[in-house]
Amino acid sequence: MTDTAKVKVGILGGGGILGAHMRGYPQVADRCEVVVVAEANPGRDPEIRRLLGPDIRIVRDYHEVLAMPEIVGVDILLPHHLHCPATVAAAQAGKHVLVEKVMARNIWECDRMIAACDKAGVTLTVCHDRRYHGEWMALKQIVESGVLGDVFFWKLDHNQNVVMPPTSWAHWKDGIGGGCIMSCLTHQIDALRWYAGEFATVTCMTCERPERMQGEFLGVVTGKLKSGALAELSINWWTKSNQGENRLWYEMVQACGTRGEAYRMDGRGTFIRLHDATDTAALAKYGAAALNGFVKVDSGAWGGHERCIAAWVELLRGNPAGIITSGRECRGTVEVAEAAYRSVASGRMVALPIRPRRWQPVGMPESLQGITTSREVTYHVDTGARR
């Protein structure tokens, strides 16, 4: 591809997350053109045109996008239960894939997505945007510098008020992949794996209220990492503590180490506090004030979706891209969430890795199960995985 040529992409799905992705594409408009959006619901057309312009092409069947020879890659923003079939169909059509988190409902589906893309020779990227966000990256740099010493405890929270009506695919376990843990605590799980490495064991407790959603609205996951560190991750979808003047937070991540601690909180930034007065290099970098309280550190002024999409576009153009959320890497995030569900079901601690199991439907209205097209997709790709 020449330096002046624009890579052409299509977007599959025009729901609410489209707005977040459209903060990214205008930043790379000199290198990339979104030429088509596939959205089955005509009621979403006005918002799609507001975000992408009045002349954007909209189709109802995403296979029309996959059949367009000029399309190099597709950005999949479909409901979670459609991530696997849509990714496999895209791979079979020779399209590179960017799929919104969560990658899939379980690792059985993840394995089929990875295998299909490998077989077709196309790339699979997951938009786990926190890894690309400036403030989250600043915390990563602190941890990797070693200034905190031996990090022995992690705490990660996700708080918001979410009610999923039965008319939404996200109300149902079959649609969302369980509940709030698979849907959004996977942000925290993925970030922790990025910061601190893999989990060794997982335990979990959840609460369900059918008037809010079929799956859990509240979950607490505790884990022991392979490093020996302990972790506590929680998600609450029945709280307004993240709103208002005297609010708590939407998301928070804290790392406690033998020589210091650090945290990132939405709306505030990334902070560090030092415990070791003999670390002259750390004092020179962060100042003596860091011995007496938390001090804010510099971080990049960019959001995660923007930076992820920019990296993906460079990947499509065949340039060095800095992709850190490949499908093979993000499979591990789904594995931890799935292990948490198995802990709830068994009432026991679950050791990782776990064996893949095919998704077992638990009941979602037939009207919400469709692939938004009139055609079915075969995605039983043989991966040799244990079942």
Image: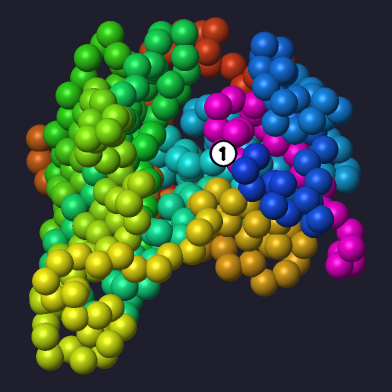
Q: Position of residue 263 (x, y in %)?
A: 25, 59
Q: Is residue 66 part of the magenta span, yes or no?
A: no
Q: Secondary structure at mark 1?
A: helix
Residue 42: x, y in percent?
A: 71, 12
Specify whether 126 is left or right of 211.
right
- Per the image, the residue denoted by label 1 is 20
- Residue 10 magenta-highlighted: yes
User: What residue is at 34 percent from the left and 56 percent from the top?
Assistant: 269
Q: Residue at x 53, y 56 (%)?
A: 302
Number of residues whose C-alpha sits closer than 10 Å to that of mark 1, classed few (under 14), some (14–19) or many (20 or more) = few
**Residue at (55%, 27%) from the top-left corner?**
16
Q: Is residue 97 left or right of residue 3?
A: left
The magenta stretch is 1-21
- Residue 46 occupies which quadrant of the picture? top right
- Viewer can see residue 336: no
- From the image, which quarter does the C terminus lie in? top left
In this rendering, position of residue 377 left or right of residue 223:
right
Q: Amino acid at mark 1?
A: Ala
